[in-house]
Image (cartoon, rainbow, N blue to C red):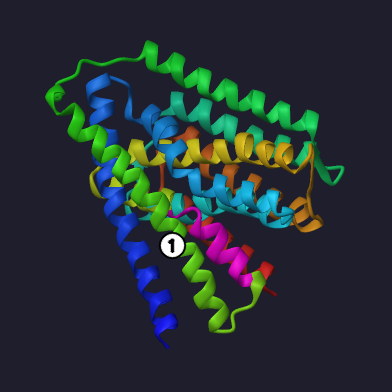
Amino acid sequence: MSETLLFYLLFIFGIILIVKGGDMFVDAASWIATVSGIPKFIIGATIVSIATTLPELLVSVFASLEGKVDMAVGNAVGSVTANIALILATSIIFLPCNADRKNLFIKGGIMIFSSALLICLSISGALNFYSSFVLLFLFALFIFENIKAAGNDKTKSYADKGNVSTNVIKFIVGAAGIVFGADLLVDNGSTIACMLGVSESIIGVTVIAIGTSLPELVTSITAIVKKESSLSIGNILGANIIDLTLILPLCSLVYGGSLPVSRQSLLIDMPVCLVVSAIAIIPALLSGKFKRTTGFILLFIYLVYLSILCL
């Protein structure tokens, strides 16, 4: 009984960590953007995204090392789908916002292209050594494009630059809180689900894929509450690009240069990922807005997707 109680307490503590960590993290990231003059969309797509993608990276790489390749691939691709069809969808349902067409065209385009390319590179049933380097090259282009954009698009700063140490500490502590909180939530959530008799397939689809996306969820919700929608959208797009072009190639290299891709991933998970990516980005580019209608469509697709996997 005491052990069961501990699982629940650690689960709740994980929630507290990611909520408080997300609050500190977004505050610090917003301050960095203001002081540096770098657009918040760029900050969200790079620094924030890399930090909030750590759970996916750690879970997938460790899964690959342990030979659990279906978990590694499913977590990375499933996290992208959850980020778009659950997190972004929920965000724009509660707070529709204008789209920065220039940045969205580049980063949204990279995300959609990466999703389609991943299907093509995995069509043989495995992501091999050479395919991994093609995806890593895309990741390098993504980072280069952000560095270039940051250099060309600086604005005058009015922030107090005297709070450097405070904001750096908030950034680091906030990121650590998000990562460790998500880890506690996933581990103890999985244990609780097993104790309640929930099947492994449902645990994998919900606890692992959605659980490792909690940093993006918390960071995005916190950013929206603080009226930083550009930071939120940039974070989601950046995290998705990192999932597709960095995490999966690393898993392949760690596993030995050829990462097996299951039939389910190839025929269901990856196509759904591509479809929701296109539905999220293309209408926003055409209209210049992220609309509630798009959010409801994405959420509906995600619920149907989960239902199919759990049958």
Q: Quadrant of residue 3?
A: bottom left
In the orientation shown, which residue stands out farthest toward the right? 124
Image point (45%, 53%), residue name: 87
Q: Is residue 95 left or right of residue 310?
A: left
Q: Is residue 187 above or below residue 39?
A: below
Q: Is residue 140 above or below residue 3?
A: above
The reply to whether residue 292 is visible in this rendering is no
Secondary structure predominantly adopted by residues drawn in magenta = helix
Task: From the image, tell me which residue sits under label 1.
Answer: 184
Residue 102, compared with residue 170, is above or below; it is: above
Q: Residue furthest front?
A: 2
Q: Is residue 271 visible?
A: yes
Q: What's the residue at 64%, 77% (across, down)?
A: 199
Residue 59: where, in percent of width, then height? 58, 52
Q: 63 left or right of 155?
A: right
Residue 246 coordinates in the image, percent (x, y): 61, 35
Amino acid type shown at disc 1: Leu
Q: Secondary structure at mark 1?
A: helix
Q: Percent position (x, y) of residue 257?
A: 79, 37
Query: Would residue 206 be counted in the magenta stretch?
Result: yes
Q: Nearer the viewer, residue 186 or 206?
A: 186
Residue at 53%, 65% (x, y): give it: 207
Q: Quadrant of the C terminus?
A: bottom right
Q: Is residue 35 above or below residue 268?
A: above
Q: In the orientation shown, which residue stands out farthest toward the bottom?
A: 1
Expressed as whole percent of the image width and height from the top left, the position of residue 310 reads 66, 72
Magenta-drawn segment:
202-214
Quadrant location of the N terminus in the rendered image: bottom left
Q: Residues within 10 Å of mark 1 (few under 14, many from 20)?
A: many
